[in-house]
Image: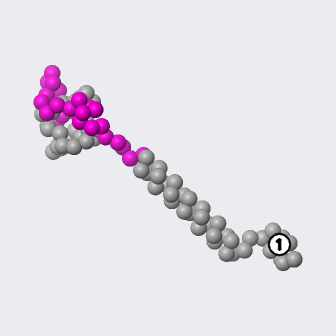
Amino acid sequence: MSEHERFGLVSRRDLLNIAAVGASALVTSGVSYAASAAPKKFTQKQAHYQPIPKSGQRCQTCALWQPPTDCQQVEGPVSPAGWCILYVRKS
């Protein structure tokens, strides 16, 4: 009986293999978490986007507006004069 078997020791090779598998699992779970944590935007249709203002509300006065033609929550280019149901007045 070898010393490793007698004392339940793990060989250096086994330890390195275990560490590599564990590191791979952590990286994989981190990548999948980052992908799932990425914010998903609404389509213009889902947000009921229209390129004209509604009741004085317009994209460029919305808290979600990102000049010159982007929105934090709606996909694609949006007009500064546009509007959608996600409108939130800037404070």
Residue that protrudes farthest toward the bottom in the picture: 2
* Quadrant in which residue 3 is drawn: bottom right
| Secondary structure found at label 1 | helix
Q: Residue 91 location, x and y as percent?
A: 25, 30
What secondary structure characterizes most of the magenta part?
Answer: loop
Q: Residue 10 location, x and y as percent?
A: 74, 70
> What residue appears at the point 36 percent right and 43 percent down from the top-left corner?
39
Residue that protrudes farthest toward the front in the picture: 45
Q: Residue 13 location, x and y as percent?
A: 67, 75
Q: Residues within 10 Å of mark 1 (few under 14, many from 20)?
A: few
Q: Does 36 lie within the magenta span? A: no
In this orientation, does residue 16 appear? yes
State the quadrant of the N terminus. bottom right
Q: Is residue 11 above or below residue 53?
A: below
**Residue 2 falls left or right of residue 47:** right
> What residue appears at the point 22 percent right and 38 percent down from the top-left corner?
65
> What residue appears at the point 14 percent right and 33 percent down from the top-left corner?
51
Total count of labels: 1
User: Which range of residues does the magenta coloring cover?
Assistant: 37-63
Q: Is residue 77 above or below residue 49?
A: below
Q: Where does label 1 land, which residue? A: 5
Q: 84 or 64, which is in the foreground? A: 84
* Quadrant in which residue 49 is drawn: top left
